Image: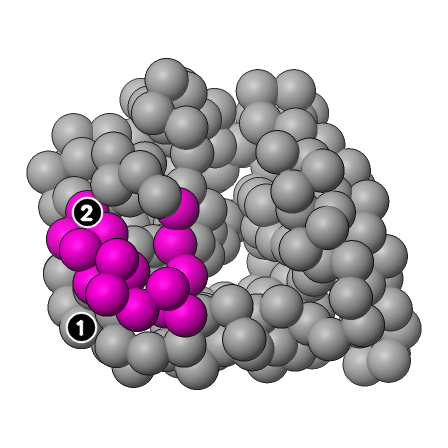
Amino acid sequence: MKEFWNDRYGQDEYTYGKEPNVFIQETLPTLTPGKILFPADGEGRNSVFAAELGWDVSAFDYSSRGKEKADSLATSKGVKVDFTIQSFLQEEYAPEEFDAIGLTYVHFPVAIKTTMHERLDSYLKVGGYVVLEAYSKEHRELNKLNPDLGGPPDAEVMYSLEEIERDFKNYEFVTLEKRMVQLKEGFGHVGESSVIRFIGRKVAPR
């Protein structure tokens, strides 16, 4: 998979564009800036946006090419992002280090999805927020009709409302919905897509 993403990010054009995800763009300005983590942030569009808003930003991805482009984007915007190359289950952060975690189209392998949610939860302070947008399981059928929509080939790695409710029981659900959105994110996400949107505030340790 590392080779897949290095190849995908290997061209000069930004696969998902340089602008942040719309849900991130709408949500982060409503939160008080603090320290935020973006797992699997690819080419850095969301982490750089957060840094522009005054957040202290950490991000990771296992694509070295993605990091190069993220660093370049941060430099062009005059901001700093602590962007590291790390893999799922091997990422290292301190307990309760972050005030927020942003997840956009991060689809964990089924075998580690709940475990990764638990790990990310451990890095978040009580009172902190998870902001997530990802494909719903229903998106797979749309993707079959229009490959330009993007998304993984396995519906099981996508999300359902029930999975969010199960894995984030120690959260207040500020927003939890499945909806159709018109995506225009570079050339990687283009067209009407079925997504899950979740804003959760951590109210207790797991």
At horizontal 81% and vertical 72% (from top left) the residue drawn is 12
Decide whether residue 52 is among the magenta residues. no
Q: Secondary structure at mark 1?
A: strand
At horizontal 72% and vertical 58% (from top left) the residue drawn is 9
Q: Label 1 sits on what residue type?
A: Met
Marks 1 and 2 sit apart, C-alpha to C-alpha, by 12 Å
Looking at the picture, tell me which residue is in the foreground, 173 or 157: 157
Q: Quadrant of the N terminus?
A: top right
Looking at the picture, tell me which residue is in the foreground, 15 or 36: 15
Report the coloring of the rendering: one colour
Looking at the picture, tell me which residue is in the foreground, 184 or 126: 184
Looking at the image, residue 140 sits to the left or right of residue 147; the answer is left
At horizontal 66% and vertical 46% (from top left) the residue drawn is 5
Residue, far left? 162
Crowdedness near tag 2: few (<14), some (14–19) or many (≥20) residues, C-alpha within 10 Å: some
Whether residue 157 is situated above or below residue 21 in the rendered picture? above
Q: Which residue is mark 1?
A: 180
Magenta stretch, main secondary structure class: helix
Which comes before the other along the chain, label 1 or label 2?
2
Q: Which residue is mark 2?
A: 137
Looking at the image, residue 16 sits to the left or right of residue 114; the answer is right
What span is colored magenta in the figure?
A: 137-152
**Residue 55 appears at what percent x and percent y?**
65, 64
